[in-house]
Image (cartoon, grey):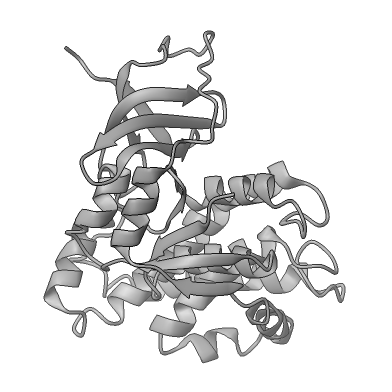
Amino acid sequence: MSDLILHHFDLSPFAEKVRLMLGLKQLSWRSVEIPMVMPKPDLVALTGGYRKTPVLQIGADVYCDTRLIARELERRYPSPSLFPHGGGALVEALSAWSDRVFFDPGAGLAMGTNQAFIPAPVLEDRKAFFNFMDFETLEANLPHLYTQVAVGLELVDRQLEDGRHYLGGNAPGLIDIQAYFPLWMLRGNVARTPQLVAGYPRLQAWEQRLQQLGHGDRRPCTSAEALAIARSASSSVVPTVDPNDPLGLAAGDLVTVTPDDYGRVPVQGTLYCLHTQEVAIRREDDRAGTVVVHFPRGGYRIDRVAG
């Protein structure tokens, strides 16, 4: 089996989510550290321009979005499970809460309370990337954002009030990682975080248990090595396109896949897989060779390229 290669940067909250998945599963993986801001030419060679972090590469298969990465890790490495108490579909559905309702105000606080200190290139990149933030009114909205973060913190603490160690029961799982990564972001970026969590002792104990998951066995990898691995490999996924899909697409159609929330950069390729939960496109690149880029179906728009 090909090595797991995570393309990420250490300060990325969503990358921390995947690093903890790798830690929970006690996996060995190779780390390619990417720039925080564009341009990212080596990563673009693999992804075709996908803006979000992280990306998981397995040979010539490139997995985008932490929801799909979680699903793929669970498929390939089922034990220990990300879903020790079952309910995998419900846990995945809860990502809509953690990735947006809890994360977005936390990201607003991280940007708004530090805007004067953020390097100009990073700030300009994030203004283009985070279309859900109004940077002109961000500082004025800080009190509101604090209230929204407090809602999330209280929810997590309340789930633990029966004495359980983890949100699903007595073993850690993806549901914990999803609720933890916005708090991890707050700890690293918002000075008032200790005051925000002071009234939630159960949450603080849970947070310490999550930190003990670690990140698995991390080994360095250069982007040049990752590209060479992709060039020498072939996709391990059998191409399948649902003939009854409402979009009426066929294998080989030229399409774009675009996130429908933020980081809305279309990625173009020929349709390789299409079903209810996933879309994958085949791309050719001079440096990466032939790669298949995978996305979850939910939250992504697929359009046929005219012509």
Whole-percent x, y for residue 292 in the image: 40, 36
Relative height, residue 188 to residue 222 (above, below): below
Q: Quadrant of residue 256?
A: top left
Q: Quadrant of residue 293?
A: top left
**Residue name at image x 38 percent, y 44 percent:** 232
Whole-percent x, y for residue 76 in the image: 66, 47
Q: Quadrant of residue 61?
A: top left
Residue 42 seen in render: yes
For this rendering, which residue is in front, 201 or 234?
234
Whole-percent x, y for residue 4 in the image: 52, 57
- Left or right position of 24 against 64: right
**Residue name at image x 20 percent, y 41 percent:** 286
Whole-percent x, y for residue 140 in the image: 27, 73
- Left or right position of 12 against 154: left
Residue 52 seen in render: no
**Residue name at image x 77 percent, y 70 percent:** 166
- Left or right position of 110 against 75: left
The quadrant of the rendering that contains the C terminus is: top left
